[in-house]
Image (cartoon, rainbow, N blue to C red):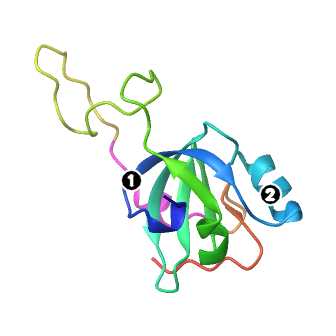
Amino acid sequence: MTLRGCGPGTRVRVAEVRVPVADRLRLAELGFVRGAEIRVVGRGTAGGLLVALGDARVALDGATAAGVRVLPPSPTDPASPGPAAGTATPGAPATAQAPTSSTTAHAPASSAAAVVPGAAVHA
């Protein structure tokens, strides 16, 4: 399965990156290495994706996303996600969630998001 075939909200782990060497090196610098957990944030109309790697957001064009082979996270992996945010686990203490600010929805151009050359994501 490739990253391009994943929908928003999907969590996967990188299995292999098959793109040209220069792009592969840049993706490795951004954190696209074997075993890295990725969450698909959004999908563009032309096949591009916006993905999350930890706290960073990266936009990939469709061709690059098609070159990233992925696997579902292992259920025994301690880094794999537990229950979805906002859901309670029976017997677990409730936790408060911080309110979101309207300023976080419109980050300035100098935010931590990275864009791979040729990428265009329209969410």
Q: Is 100 positioned to the left or the right of 104 in the image? A: left
Q: Residues within 10 Å of mark 2 (few under 14, many from 20)?
A: some
Label 2 to label 1: alpha-carbon separation: 22 Å
Q: Residue at x 73, y 80 (%)?
A: 118
Residue 60 locus on image (x, y percent)? 63, 69
Q: Nearer the viewer, residue 85 or 38?
A: 38
Q: Residue at x 66, y 59 (%)?
A: 113
Residue 108 locus on image (x, y percent)? 64, 66
Q: Which residue is mark 2?
A: 24
83 magenta-colored: no
Residue 92 locus on image (x, y percent)? 18, 16
Mark closer to the chain start, 2 or 1: 1
Q: Quadrant of the C terminus?
A: bottom left
Is any atom of residue 108 visible in this view? no
107 magenta-colored: yes
Judge whether 26 appears above or below 34 on screen: below
Q: Which residues, given as a range, are shown in magenta? A: 99-108
Q: Residues within 10 Å of mark 1 (few under 14, many from 20)?
A: some
Q: Secondary structure beneath disc 1? A: loop
Main SS category, magenta section: loop
Q: Nearer the viewer, residue 73 or 113?
A: 73
Q: Residue at x 37, y 50 (%)?
A: 100
Q: Is 41 positioned to the left or the right of 93 in the image? A: right
Residues marked 2 and 1 touching at CB (< 8 Å): no
Residue 44 locus on image (x, y percent)? 48, 79
Q: Nearer the viewer, residue 114 or 23?
A: 23
Q: Which mark is residue 10?
A: 1
Q: Residue at x 44, y 37 (%)?
A: 73
Residue, far bottom = 46
Q: Mark 1 belongs to which amino acid?
A: Thr
